[in-house]
Image (tube, coloured by chain):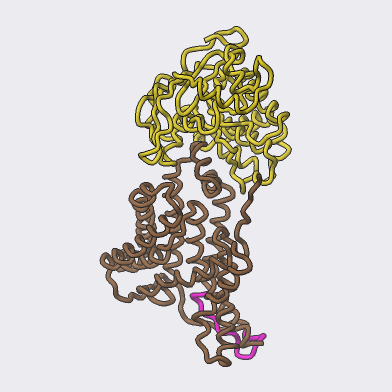
Amino acid sequence: MGPFLEVLIGGLLTGVLYSLVALGFVLIFKASGVFNFAQGAMVLFAALSLVRFLEVMPLWAALLGSAALMVALAVVIERVVLRPLVNQEPIILFMSTLGITFFIDGFGQSLFGSDVYPLDVGIPKDPIFIAENTFEGGLLVDQVDLWAAVVAGLLVLVLALFFQRTRIGRALRAVADDHQAAQSVGIPLNQIWVIVWSVAGLVALVAGIMWGTKLGVQFSIALVALKALPVLILGGLTSVPGAIVGGLLIGAGEKLAEVYFGPIIGGGIENWFAYMLALAILLFRPQGLFGERIIERV
Amino acid sequence: MERRDGTTTGAALLEVNNIEVIYNHVILVLKGVSLSVPEGAIVALLGANGAGKTTTLKAISNLLRAERGEVTKGSIHYRGERVDALNPSELVRRGLIQVMEGRHCFAHLTVEENLLTGAFTRAREGKARIAEDLELVYKYFPRLRERRRSIAGYTSGGEQQMTAIGRALMSKPKMILLDEPSMGLAPQLVEEIFEIVAQLNRQEGVSFVVAEQNTNIALRYADYGYILENGRVVMDGAADVLRSNEDVKEFYLGLSTTGRKSYRDVKHYRRRKRWLA
């Protein structure tokens, strides 16, 4: 039982990290119908800026600086990309986010350098043993992952309150439902897009801090976004809770598959398990486990 | 302008002057439409499918730009101010709002949340004022109070139309552009909706421009009417005058002095007698 739980917990916690990236996708997709491929690049950009700011200023100032930078990025993206492309086909907007991805990747690295930087924001990194009384030798858990889980929980809570209880949150949901109607009642779409990309940028910053602490800040954390894709398919592109549950399922699934089925077929399952799962979900439930049912009346 | 109840209306609230609208830089949809809406009036915009009713309304509320449409000629004045370049949000703040064709409720929001989004531009006035207006909307649409917690997407067509009008009311409008309120609704409901429109007009002083295919009911409630055909105004006049006009009877009210005609005759008559503005 001990080893099984250890793998399960490790997997779930890694899954939370996937969820943090997936959240950013969900936010933007919900509010603007744009599948923002650049979310991974934004995670890298946020983490890079934070690590370089930390070299010259205290933690709180660096956090503020990075947050401000992400908001500024949102303003620029709205002005330069989204506004001229208003009312274009989703595929065109998607392609434009591909462009944004490459721009942010390159621009971030030429601005902040492309080395591997260790990130230390005070999160303890040593693995610890928990439940030593119940299991012999206890369960080995990565503290960074544990913190990530706490942060992700808080983040989801804050986002849920923001969406359900505030005037801006209500406006964001209205825009997600019907752009034109939102515009007709006087909700300014441009402002809403800046807000939603800013929120996604801040979520990227949180994800960047967690991934950066775990792996060091380097180009490969932009590729984490690829792991967020199956999470999105599993959880549903429009659901915040879906992003979390999807992440947990994928994280736990791939670790368990690696440990228990890996030896049978020669290992390496972890790398493709998530995508196979996503494929299976697409066949049977294309809107994902928690995706919004499309309401249509005639 | 003299209203149907004998009172006269105020100065022009909205003045549309010879506008031309082009979609996607190539498709000419409006070829010079002019109309005038006095303060406190209900004006009907009539015509068949594709005549340009919706485009006219969207040109006024400036929802055109989101559809790649553009007013290329003419001008639009609202309360004496030129408004062609203002975005919809600025227009809503000035009291001019559109209720779009096909209701367009926010399907995943509750009815009450839908109504509250209408007050988005009024955040500075404080929650108490907005709560008062919510009560006002419920007074006009008691059915919405019963359904306030329902998800709008699952309510009936009539309730959605009421939600859409109520949502517009939450912005404290001076003028509502109402696009095809009768679409897909049972005749009894259509009557109910128009009755409420008339009440809002009388009691809250809201002016209306109503685009309708249902010429009969629109002319019964409106003070004045404009008939559009192929992107042009081909006829306009007081609602009563239009109702008794032979051509309007023939083409839009389905009445004729010589009894029923076959569809072929009507088509022929139509082709021969094009209205020229």
Q: Position of residue B13 (x, y in %)?
A: 47, 19
Report which colour depicts chain A. Answer: brown
Magenta run includes residue A96: no
B91 displayed left or right of A287? left
A73 or B57: which is nearer to us? B57
Q: Position of residue B47 (x, y in %)?
A: 54, 26
Q: Position of residue B230 (x, y in %)?
A: 47, 28
Could you say which chain is coloured yellow in the image?
B
Q: Position of residue B189 (x, y in %)?
A: 71, 30
Q: So how many labels did they put on this image?
A: 0
Q: Quadrant of residue A99?
A: bottom left
Task: Provide the residue span drawn in magenta.
Answer: A132-145
B176 or A282: which is nearer to us? A282
Say if residue B200 shows up in the picture. Answer: no
Residue drawn at x 41%, y 55% is A93
Q: Which residue is farthest top? A: B6
